[in-house]
Amino acid sequence: MVRHLADPIQQNVWAERLGGLLAPIKLHPTQIYEAAATLLIFVILLFVYRKRQFHGQVIIVYAILYAIARFIIEYWRDDPRGEFFDLSTSQFIAVVLFIGAIIAYFWRWRTTSNSRSEKRLRNRRNKRNRRKLSWCQCA
């Protein structure tokens, strides 16, 4: 783990006590939490990409998952709290992003259920599958 300030005085599983400028305050390694959350989001997005139902679904799901991760991780950070319901600025932005992404997801899902873009997506998948089959068939 990268240490930005001083060497830790005492280590814990989830938090560290840092000396020096901060006095002995326990801090969570939020960079590690962020990396783990990003890896988990990537794995989920791979699954969503394979099963996507409409164009834009992957980026919208990413926005939803990132907003959730950012909101949770910000609780462990010691950032100054803002004026909106005692949330940090990043948490407030995460809430706005989450609401916007949920609205976009349902709007896209409803408008593309039987539209041309869904048919195009199906046609692309069929073409891709046909190319795979024609490549495998050796004469």
Image: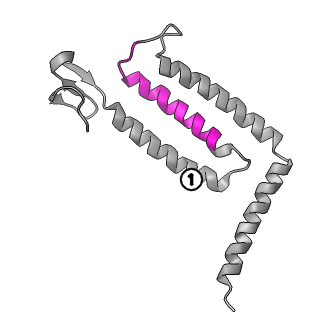
Q: Is residue 4 left or right of residue 80?
A: left
Q: Position of residue 110 (x, y in %)?
A: 80, 39
Region rendered in magenta: 59-80
Seen from the viewer's position, the closer of residues 98 and 89 is 89
**What colour scheme does the image use?**
one colour
Residue 92 to residue 129: above or below: above
Q: Position of residue 65 (x, y in %)?
A: 55, 37
Residue 3 to residue 82: above or below: below
Instruction: Report if residue 68 lies within the magenta region.
Output: yes
- Could you tell me which residue is drawn at 37 percent across and 23 percent down? 77
For label 1, the residue is 46
- Could you tell me which residue is drawn at 69 percent across and 44 percent down? 56
**What is the three-letter code of the residue carrying label 1?**
Leu
Residue 130 to residue 32: above or below: below
**Hey, which residue is sitting farthest bottom in the picture?**
139
Instruction: Report if residue 85 lies within the magenta region.
Output: no
Q: Mark 1: few, some, or many residues within 10 Å (few <14, many ≥20)?
A: few
In which quadrant of the rendered image does the N terminus lie? Answer: top left
**Hey, which residue is sitting farthest top in the picture?**
83
Hey, which quadrant is residue 79 in on the image? Answer: top left
Q: Is residue 29 left or right of residue 75?
A: left
- Could you tell me which residue is drawn at 51 percent across and 47 percent down? 42
- Could you tell me which residue is drawn at 74 percent across and 73 percent down? 130
Looking at the rendered structure, the secondary structure element under dot 1 is helix
